[in-house]
């Protein structure tokens, strides 16, 4: 365990830049995108300005793609210089390959975009030459990129009708390997050295949907391959699937969703979560102990566990092991629908964005695997949240067109302390420049950094300080608007070792059901002196009637 630094040492390291590599953020407004340096842990001066309608970084942050109306410009972020300009009018989206050797571009398939109809193209960045092009009928942001590269760029693949085509990136056109999967809808290559492929087939013609796991085929011969999958998982009521691979490619989570809830418990459809190990020897449905949607699932960067936020409000957050998908630890319940790990898996933030008030709770992972609450705050109206590459700050942003008022971004320390609030009249995006994990050192919390205002978890204002509220007598709060389905019971808030739901505490009596108006309480007929007296009278009357004359 690394020695804990004091808060003064922590801030000094950030101010002097001794956290190894300097960090940058990019913000895009009405006048283009600006790359800003971080000075003393706060947003500093502009070091680069770019004209762009969209910006995309490579995975290591070395290159920046700026999408314009008729071209895509590639910049070197270390020198802030233009490397290459690619003539692709009407570009919708771009994506860098794993080592940033190639750029995948999708254009509009019309006169203002790809005029010849081939709107999906791959460009080699070292030469600026287009090495592959084809026609892509539809564009779905959730399935982008539709042409994927492995982490080491040794293989690329894309989905066509009933097949998955594999290419050798060094020669994309001639060398082709085809894997036949009937009715395949989407696929995802795993990261890591030994690439695997997971494919989703939706529910069709009364047959259940399924997810299949395959080895990536070799390029020894050019033929159609029909091989048996390493693993297969079938399920009904799943129309779409989102794949979440662990960073080492050892396992994958399948987040399935449907627009219709067969149980009629939700207007927003139904969702489920499944787990498959990459070796194909183990798969299961993730055991969730509360009914309701799966809000989010996220792997720890350490690859030994993952967090799932699930259930009707107040949602629960539970940590599962990565080898057998067993519940290991629970972080409590509350108004949460998002989870963010820092790049080292040391800190984790549970938050509630969207239609939730923006409460955030920060946890510190200890060496024994336990989690301790170190702070809480509220980031109202936040659209996005992202940890800094050094894992010491969290940035939340309020952007347009999701919200057209109160645009800007905030920087929070890892314990929920507000460091900076930058306001903008119009902000379209704000994000960190990525970096390799090796560029920074994983450091524990500073001595004295645990916040003392965490007993209420979400009971903090925008600055992260404890809110003071006037006293209200009990009768004045009953049904007065303080009722919230997102509020957890006191015993469910804090983190702790996973416990099975207490089925003995559940009751089907009226006092255990909350179907009345907020603040109301059902009265049991078995309680009270009068009720007991009346029960004895009724029992005596029945006994007299049964005895007869």
Image (cartoon, rainbow, N blue to C red):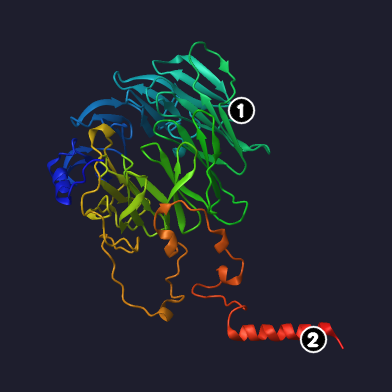
The crowd level at tag 2 (other Cα within 10 Å; few <14, some 14-19, many 20+) is: few
250 relative to 218, above or below: below
Can you tell which quarter of the image residue 481 is in?
Answer: bottom left
Name which residue lies at 49% across and 43% down: 326
Judged from the image, the secondary structure of the residue bearing numbered disc 1 is loop
Comparing 117 with 99, the one in front is: 99
Residue 118 position, x and y percent, is 45, 25
Tell me, yes or no, if residue 515 can be seen here: no
Tell me, yes or no, if residue 146 can be seen here: yes
Residue 62 position, x and y percent, is 25, 30
Alpha carbon separation for disc pair 2 and 1: 75 Å
> Which callout, 2 or 1, points to the residue nearer the camera?
2
Q: Residue furthest top?
A: 221
Residue 532 position, x and y percent, is 63, 83
Residue hosting label 1 = 182
Q: Residue furthest right?
A: 549
Residue hosting label 2 = 544
Residue 235 position, x and y percent, is 61, 40
Can you tell which quarter of the image residue 211 is in?
Answer: top right
The tag earlier along the polypeptide, 2 or 1, is 1
- Horizontal placement of 264 versus 71: left or right? right
Comparing 479 with 143, the one in front is: 479
Q: Residue furthest bottom?
A: 549
Name which residue lies at 49% across and 74% down: 519
């Amino acid at each position: 365990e690394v020695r804990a630094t004091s808060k003064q040492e922590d801030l000094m390291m950030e101010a002097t830049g001794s956290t190894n590599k300097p960090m940058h953020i990019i913000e895009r407004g009405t006048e283009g995108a600006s790359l800003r340096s971080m000075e003393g842990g706060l947003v500093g001066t502009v070091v680069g300005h770019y004209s762009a309608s969209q910006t995309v970084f490579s995975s290591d942050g070395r290159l920046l793609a700026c999408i314009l109306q008729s071209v895509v410009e590639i910049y070197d972020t270390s020198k802030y210089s233009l490397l290459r300009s690619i003539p692709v009018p009407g570009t919708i989206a771009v994506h860098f390959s794993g080592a940033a050797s190639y750029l995948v571009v999708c254009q509009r398939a019309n006169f203002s975009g790809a005029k010849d109809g081939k709107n999906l193209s791959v460009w080699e960045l070292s030469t600026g030459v287009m090495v592959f092009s084809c026609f892509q009928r539809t564009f779905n942001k959730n399935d982008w990129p539709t042409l994927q590269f492995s982490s080491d760029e040794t293989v690329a693949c894309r989905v066509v009708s009933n097949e998955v085509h594999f290419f050798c990136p060094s020669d994309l056109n001639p060398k082709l390997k085809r894997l036949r999967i009937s009715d395949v809808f989407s696929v995802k290559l795993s990261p890591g050295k030994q690439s695997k492929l997971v494919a989703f087939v939706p529910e069709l013609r009364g047959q259940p949907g399924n997810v299949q796991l395959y080895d990536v085929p070799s390029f020894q011969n050019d033929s159609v391959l029909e091989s048996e999958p390493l693993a297969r998982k079938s399920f009904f009521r799943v129309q779409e699937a989102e794949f979440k691979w662990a960073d080492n490619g050892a396992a994958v989570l399948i987040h399935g969703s449907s627009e219709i809830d067969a149980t009629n418990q939700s207007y927003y459809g139904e969702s489920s979560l499944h787990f498959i190990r990459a070796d194909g020897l183990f798969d299961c449905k993730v055991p969730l102990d509360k009914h309701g949607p799966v809000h989010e699932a996220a792997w720890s960067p350490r690859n030994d566990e993952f967090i799932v936020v699930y259930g009707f409000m107040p949602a629960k957050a539970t940590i599962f092991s990565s080898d057998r998908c067993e519940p290991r630890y629970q972080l409590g319940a509350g108004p949460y629908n998002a989870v963010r790990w820092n790049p080292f898996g040391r800190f984790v933030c549970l938050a509630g964005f969207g239609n939730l008030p923006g409460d955030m709770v920060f946890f510190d992972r200890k060496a024994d695997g336990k989690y301790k609450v170190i702070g809480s705050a509220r980031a109202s109206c936040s659209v996005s949240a992202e940890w800094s590459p050094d894992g010491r700050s969290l940035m939340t942003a309020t952007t347009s067109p999701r919200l057209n008022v109160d645009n800007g971004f905030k920087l929070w320390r890892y314990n929920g302390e507000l460091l900076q609030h930058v306001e903008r009249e119009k902000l379209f995006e704000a994000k960190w420049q990525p970096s390799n994990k090796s560029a920074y050192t994983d450091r524990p919390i500073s001595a004295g950094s645990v916040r003392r205002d965490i007993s209420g978890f979400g009971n903090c204002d925008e600055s992260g300080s404890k809110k003071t509220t006037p006293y209200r007598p009990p009768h004045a709060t009953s049904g007065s608007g303080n009722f919230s389905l997102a509020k957890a019971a006191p015993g469910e808030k804090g983190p702790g070792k996973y416990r099975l739901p207490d089925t003995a505490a559940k009751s089907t009596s009226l006092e255990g059901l909350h179907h009345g108006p907020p603040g109301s309480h059902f009265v049991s007929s078995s309680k009270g002196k009068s009720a007991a007296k009346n029960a004895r009278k009724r029992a005596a009357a029945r006994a007299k009637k049964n005895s007869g004359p």
